[in-house]
Image (tube, grey):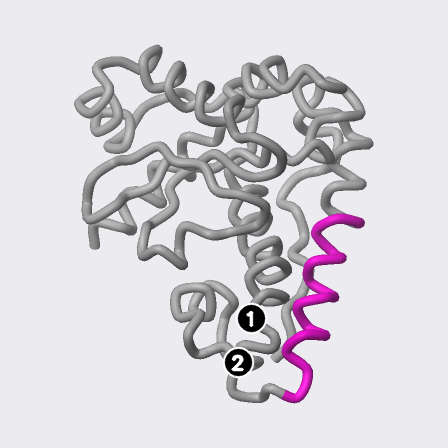
Amino acid sequence: MTSKLPELEYSYDALEPYIDAKTMEIHHSKHHKAYVDKLNAALEGKEELQERDIDDILKDLNSVPEEIRTAVVNNGGGHSNHRFFWKLLKKDVSFEGEVAEAIKQKYGSFEEFKKKFSETAIGRFGSGWAWLVLNNGELEIINTVNQDSPLSDGKVPLLTLDVWEHAYYLKYQNRRPDYVEAFFNVTNWEKVNENFKNSQS
């Protein structure tokens, strides 16, 4: 079973004006597709690994032969992270649900959570991702470098933001803080809440 580029559940222009259509098209059809193609190339001939979902592989990197492990971390992580990220984007979704209550309990308020998450996203030096994860059942805001996945550290992703320059440079150039601020207008809290509830079952 080879990995496939997932279709988006919305059009490339659905997130305008916060994330522009051209960025979404390039990001999905070029960048994400390249990760999928390179992951499949790395796993060619490795039938046991090909039969597993990439998330399961990332949770168990010791099962990956050392000679392809870096390629799987980079390209498998790129595939997994993007596949997760696309589902977290939707306009006009209210901050509510069980995850909202848990966030307010942990951080005091949405505003304080947003401040800490934004600082983490803006402060990620170079390329990477900002995340809200569950770490041993506790909410935690972290960042990861390049295409590393929290799954590899036993953490459960709930929310993420891609802060690679290709995710925002056409519209925001070097203004990453503006892109991070815009993200909160297209955060699909329904999906974040679903991720949170699934982690409790």
Determine whether 51 is above or below 179 in the image.
below
Whether 33 is among the magenta residues is yes
Q: Residues within 10 Å of mark 1 (few under 14, many from 20)?
A: some
Residue 75 in the image: state x and y as whole percent. 64, 60
Which SS type dominates the magenta stretch?
helix
Residue placed at 47% from the left, 31% from the top? 188
- Rate crowding at label 2 as few (under 14), some (14 to 19) or many (20 or more) other CA atoms within 10 Å: few
Tell me whether circle 2 and circle 1 mark residues in contact (CB < 8 Å): yes
Residue at screen point 47% across, 34% down: 130
- Determine whether, in the image, residue 110 is placed left or right of residue 37: left
What amino acid type should be assigned to the residue bearing mark 1? Arg
Q: Which mark is residue 69?
A: 1
On the picture, is 150 further left or further right than 87? left
> What element does badge 2 sit on?
loop
Residue at point 70%, 21% (across, down): 16
Indicate which disc residue 186 carries.
none
Tell whether 194 sits left or right of 24: left
Of 46 and 197, nearer the camera is 46
Mark linked to residue 65: 2
Q: Position of residue 88 (x, y in %)?
A: 51, 37
Instruction: Give the amino acid at mark 2.
Output: Pro
Image location of residue 201, percent across then percent down: 21, 55
Q: Where's the N terminus, which quadrant?
A: bottom right
The residue shown at (55%, 70%) is 69
Residue 56 x/y as whole percent:
43, 68
Extent of the magenta region: 30-45
